[in-house]
Image: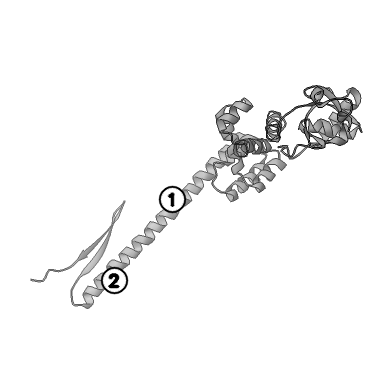
Amino acid sequence: MGAFLGFTKEKQINRVVQIDVADIVPNPHQPRTEFENGDIFSLAESIRQNGILQPLTVRRADDHYEIIAGERRLRAAKLVQLQSVPCIIMNVSERNSAILALVENIQRQNLSFFDEAAAIEKLINYYGMTQEDAAIKLGKAQSTIANKLRLLKLSDEERLVITRYNLTERHARALLKLGSPEDRLLIINRVVKGKLNVEKTEQIIEEYIAKNGEKESYRKRSKVFADVRLFVNSINKAVETMKAAGISADSCKIQYDDFVEYRVRIPIEK
């Protein structure tokens, strides 16, 4: 193991040392779920020509080293068959290593917005931070953190389709106005088919909500009308019962523009 030879542990800490590639393992808390092959190949070619310009950051973990930052560089180094890579060894706990890895990846511009949201959620839930703590750690506004966390309300299927068709974070946030995954997937398909930008997407979402709001209003009115019919039937039955008992009661319906009036006449015996 390259880094264990020739250096004491104390001298290695926070210094650039060469470590055998075979002795380095990925961080289990790496928030990035996908690595673009094209980016890795491009980085590999750069390393072939110029070497690794920025050392990886690692920590000791039993008989190996665990990456804190630099997994893309490690993957690219393996492609060009480097035997060792320059690293800075940090003396941090597993918890702090995970937090550093999450923060380093979240701050990268090319991390997908769903991976970024999941990483922020992990900082908050797994490591006991508040949204405010995470915002300070990441140098972002708390409202930005809250908006990113809202993206996790989308189902795995919705996230997959959004990612597959390269829809933006603003597309995803607009979809959250819809109440169900079924409605959102319907709109996503329209957006993809029509290649709609964010503005057009927001427009069809508002139209969809308005249209379905009318349907819901009609459904509620229909229920009210059904209840009214039950009430009228009860009146008619009561009048028929009185007639059967020898009481000459009767009822009539009067239709007005904005309401219906029912009158029941029951004679007073003298």
Task: Say which element carries label 2.
Answer: helix
Q: Is residue 20 left or right of residue 253?
A: right
Determine which residue is flagged by label 2: 237
Q: Quadrant of residue 263?
A: bottom left
Q: Is residue 61 left or right of residue 254?
A: right
- Number of residues whose C-alpha sits closer than 10 Å to that of mark 1, classed few (under 14), some (14–19) or many (20 or more): few
> Who comes first in sequence, dot 1 or dot 2?
1
The reply to whether callout 1 and callout 2 are in contact (CB within 8 Å) is no
Q: Quadrant of the C terminus?
A: bottom left
- Looking at the image, the residue that sits furthest to the left is 270
At 76% across and 39% down in the image, what residue appears?
A: 34
Image: 139 above or below 217: above
Residue 201 in sight = no
Residue 98 in the image: x percent, y percent?
70, 34
- Number of residues whose C-alpha sits closer than 10 Å to that of mark 2, classed few (under 14), some (14–19) or many (20 or more): few
Residue 197 in the image: x percent, y percent?
64, 35
Task: Say which element carries label 1.
Answer: helix
Find the distance from the CA under tag 1 to the CA under tag 2. Answer: 30 Å
Q: Is residue 76 left or right of residue 139?
A: right
Image: 28 above or below 51: below
Residue 179 in sight = yes
Q: Quadrant of the N terminus?
A: top right
At 70% across and 41% down in the image, what residue appears?
A: 163
Label 2 amino acid?
Lys
Determine which residue is flagged by label 1: 217
Residue 194 in the image: x percent, y percent?
66, 41
Of residue 134 and residue 47, the one placed in the foreground of this image is: 134
Q: Quadrant of residue 234?
A: bottom left
Label 1 amino acid?
Ser
Q: Quadrant of residue 105?
A: top right
Q: Which mark is residue 36?
A: none
Residue 23 in the image: x percent, y percent?
85, 35
